[in-house]
Amino acid sequence: MKEEELHIGKIVETAFNQSGITKTKFAEAIGVHLQNLNREFANADWSVIKLRRAGEVLNYDFSWILTDKGAGRPKAKIKLEIELEEDMLDAVLSQLENKKIKNLIQK
């Protein structure tokens, strides 16, 4: 990820939106007034201290931001549960061997 594309406020806002934490609790935890929270999300440059506080309250590891070009960015996790009849198992498993799916998973 290029530095000019690294907008910390937007990254933190995305993690916040997925957290279920209230704006009031989050603003208090990172040491800003509630009415200034949206301004913080609009800010591309956050202090390391504020970013650490945000990570603690959101239970999110922002350390990848500080690595070389975001190389350690967390990968999305998707859990897929499929309920099917026993006789369909082989057909479904054979689709997972499909090279397109396999290549996507390996990337």
Image: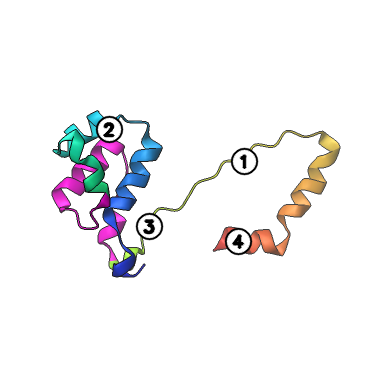
- Tell me the kind of residue under disc 3: Arg
Q: Secondary structure at mark 2?
A: helix
Magenta residues, start to end: 42-67
Which residue is under mark 1? 80
> How far, Cα to Cα, is label 1 from label 2?
31 Å
> How far, Cα to Cα, is label 2 from label 3?
25 Å
* Whole-percent x, y for residue 13 in the image: 32, 45
Considering the whole magenta stretch, tell me its main secondary structure.
Answer: helix
Which residue is under mark 3? 73
Disc 2 crowd, CA 10 A, few/some/many (<14, 14-19, 20+): some
Would you identify the image quadrant in which residue 24 lies? top left
Which residue is pictured at 38% across the width and 39% down the height?
17
Which residue is pictured at 37% across the width and 57% down the height?
73
* Whole-percent x, y for residue 89 in the image: 79, 42
Specify the quadrant that holds the C terminus: bottom right
Which residue is under mark 2? 23
Which residue is pictured at 16% across the width and 52% down the height?
48
The correct choice, above or below, for 72 with respect to 30 in the image is: below
* Whole-percent x, y for residue 32 in the image: 15, 39
Which residue is under mark 4? 104
Instruction: Give the number of the mark in front: 4 or 2.
Output: 2
Q: Secondary structure at mark 4?
A: helix
